[in-house]
Amino acid sequence: MVGYEIFVRSYRDTNEDGIGDIRGIEESISYFLSLGVNLLWLMPIFKSPSFHGYDVMDFKSVNPLYGDIEDFKRLISTLHGEGIKVILDFPLQHTSSLHPWFEKALSGDENFRNYYLWSEREEVLLERREWDGQPVWHPSPSGHYRGLFGAGLPDLNYSNEEVSRKMKEILKYWFDMGIDGVRLDAAKHIFEDSKQNKRFWGEFLKDFEGKMFIGEIWASQDTVDEYGEIFGYVFNFLLSYSIKESVKRGDPDLLIEGIQESLKDKSYIPVNFLTNHDMTRLADEIEDERKRKLAFSILMTLPGIPFIFYGEELGMKGRYDPFFTEDVLEPFPWRETLYTRGQTMWKSFKYLRAHSGFSVEANESREDSLLNHIKELGKWRRSNPWIDVASIDGLERRGSTISYELVGERRIRIFHNFSKEEVEIEGIPLKPYESFIAKG
């Protein structure tokens, strides 16, 4: 399986308002297929006051800027007809402060007030986020409420069984519509007590046997493994770091450590990636396109499900800023002019310029481009679905190279050269930063 993460607003516009839409995703199916993609992750598509969509006002609607429910139903049907599955990004930990539930809570409705977390205890109000020291509790005319990710995103109270029941109804609504799975945003923050949080998810997911849930767990590998047992799929942040740093430094040992810790002997399926919407784009971390090709070669030749963040296949740039996330979500460039049918223009380009060589058009016309490299890898990977659950054997380093064997329905040996020099391994010549796939 090959996954692809999309920010709908930035992808493809079909009604010439400058904003990407659901029909634009449908128009892009041939492009997804050319990448070997058969699993789409759509960042939040729900009604929201913000560009990013993670502060949801209505979990059962489509953002009207993107289309409507009928557009989405048609998209699901068309994608399924082409063998492509769809997962939706669900920020279930909170709502928008403009959600009707929260507005009713502020107005004094005791039932809806219990949908959220409130406190006036001084020692509680001093709580700060562990990663940046920002306040967690926010004032309102009705008292202080908890919002881990900001004042505009009040946390839901999952100790209230009615909240859990409502969220299960919402998920069932979308599964009945035909989605194949869900990305669980901020999954480790439903309850701040780790044991309580894991118990909650274990119970919550019993109603969704056989459905695909991918947990976002940005934590130690031990914690990731524990959640992997619950969800069945978790994002592999450790491997993301290991691949990028090993390629940047030319040090295969970093990759070996990452593989051994995050991929070996797992009872769940790791979801592997290089970057996502919460990270600086790959081209800003690794300027040399040959090294980026190597990073993707590694990503696509390891067990688990590989995901591509939209635009990484083109070399799009963008530095992540937690207080201004637009820079990693720039419009997707289809043609060199940047002014053509389908081009989104909801924000001005900060990194891209017309005729800069980073469009789909330019990449497709250059035989040795990163895009064409990824297309070959994607088609190979899609034709070998057994690799998702393969095991790794014979992992070893020889000088600047690393090799390992994928073991499953077949045996395939992989070689990667981390050096700027040409090398030879087992009689196989490898150019600088080149990979080779051989039968075992």
Image: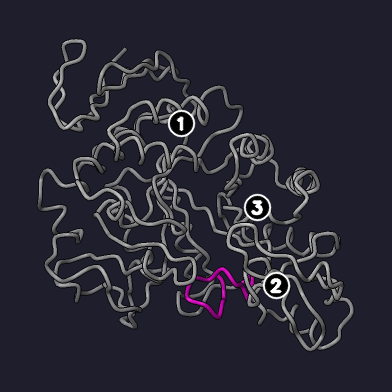
x then y, percent, for residue 30: 29, 54
The span from disc 3 to disc 1 (Cα, nearest Å) is 23 Å
The quadrant holding residue 61 is bottom right
Residue occupied by mark 3: 187
- Pointer 2 local density, CA inside 10 Å: few below 14, some 14–19, many at least 20: many
Three-letter amino acid code at disc 1?
Answer: Gly
Marked residue nearer the N-terminal end (3 or 1): 3
Out of 338 and 14, give the one closest to the viewer. 338
Which quarter of the image is occupied by the N terminus? top left
Residue 378 in view here: no
**Left or right: 257, with 420 as reference point:** right
The disc at residue 258 is 1
Marked residue nearer the N-terminal end (2 or 3): 2
Q: Which residues are magenta?
A: 46-60
Out of 344 and 15, give the one closest to the viewer. 344
Q: Residue at x 62, y 60 (%)?
A: 174
Residue 103 in view here: yes
The disc at residue 312 is none
The span from disc 2 to disc 1 (Cα, nearest Å) is 36 Å
Residue occupied by mark 2: 154
* Circle 1: element type: helix
* Circle 3: element type: helix
Marked residue nearer the N-terminal end (2 or 1): 2
